[in-house]
Amino acid sequence: MLSSDMIGQPAKGSPPAGTNQSQEFLVHPATIHGESVTLISSCLHGGLLALDVEQKALVTLATASLNLLDSTKVNLCTLLATRGKEGQEIYQIQTISGRYAVGCGKTGYITLLPAESASPSKFWRMEILSGELCFLQAKLSNGSMNVCCSWQDQLSVNKSFGGWEVWRFVDVPGSEGHFWINSWSHDNKILIGDGYDQVTVTNLKWPLPRAAKWSVKKVKGHGVLIESAEEEGRYLALNVEQGKLCTAKDPNNDDSRSLSFYWEFEPAHRNSFRIVTNEALLNASRKTKEGDEEAK
């Protein structure tokens, strides 16, 4: 796992122990030299991931002090999506110059590799940590139906409340008010309109297609509308007769009676919680109490 605790040291710095905020990063769409790129910043302090060209070491830089044009001193790192041997979405962290890739060996040491290297150590998996988890429910006259993404990546609706029915709404960085809608049971599967009024799932990739961005609008007394960023006034809907998701316009049109446009969000925990004792704290408390009694 990449950690900002490793950064600022020469490549091959030792891996940190444990899991904390230093191991969490944000991605930011940006345009540099007229090209769309995805930058990476640390959640711990906000610095952008970059390569010190002279030292050949990973560093983080504050955006305010960054000179993007001086590539002789610093090269920003960018996130690139690619395909694994089994077709899964994996990522590379490369310098914008395209010369180096960030790798991680079996022992957990960070290395810098030539970008053209075929080493599997330069491939990374992205785990989404942000976003709200919920069931996405279509409001129907005979009750609500939950949107499901099966293990075969097929969309359907049902009345179940399992993992296949849980979705995560994640803010699109740099795109205020837009979300991508990620299947919780599939690391990188998100909802997307296919341009023919149909809705499917696709792999999360950068830059994010407009058809994979959505906004949520509250409608008093009805629930919410989920609007596609690709075309204003086009909304996520359920074809009730076919049980299929689609996009369509004008929820109040008589021709849209076979479609359900209004949605509700049910918390994934369904307002049910489990309270568990922390054994480490409990044992420490017992030892302290026993020590106090002995001291008496």
Image: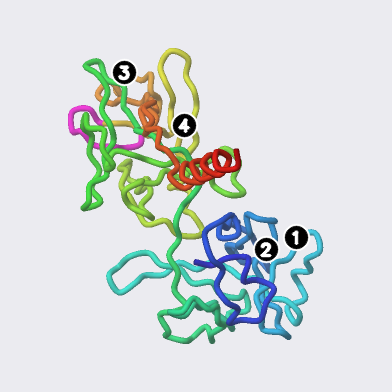
Q: Residue 266: within the magenta?
A: no
Which of labels 1 and 4 is toward the front? 1
Q: Earlier in the sequence, mark 4 or mark 3?
A: 4
Q: Earlier in the sequence, mark 2 or mark 1?
A: 2
Q: Earlier in the sequence, mark 3 or mark 2?
A: 2
| Magenta segment | 239-247
> Quick check: marks 3 and 2 in contact, CB under 8 Å?
no
Residue kind at label 1, given as amino acid type: Thr
> Quick check: marks 1 and 3 in contact, CB under 8 Å?
no
Q: Is residue 103 left or right of residue 125?
A: right
Q: Secondary structure at mark 2?
A: strand
Q: To which quarter of the image does residue 138 belong?
A: top left
Residue kind at label 2, given as amino acid type: Leu
Res. 230 visible in picture:
no
> Quick check: marks 2 and 1 in contact, CB under 8 Å?
yes
Marks 2 and 4, how far apart at CA = 36 Å
State the mark number for residue 48. 2
Q: Is residue 253 left or right of residue 25?
A: left
Residue kind at label 3, given as amino acid type: Asp
> Quick check: marks 2 and 4 in contact, CB under 8 Å?
no
Q: Residue 241: within the magenta?
A: yes
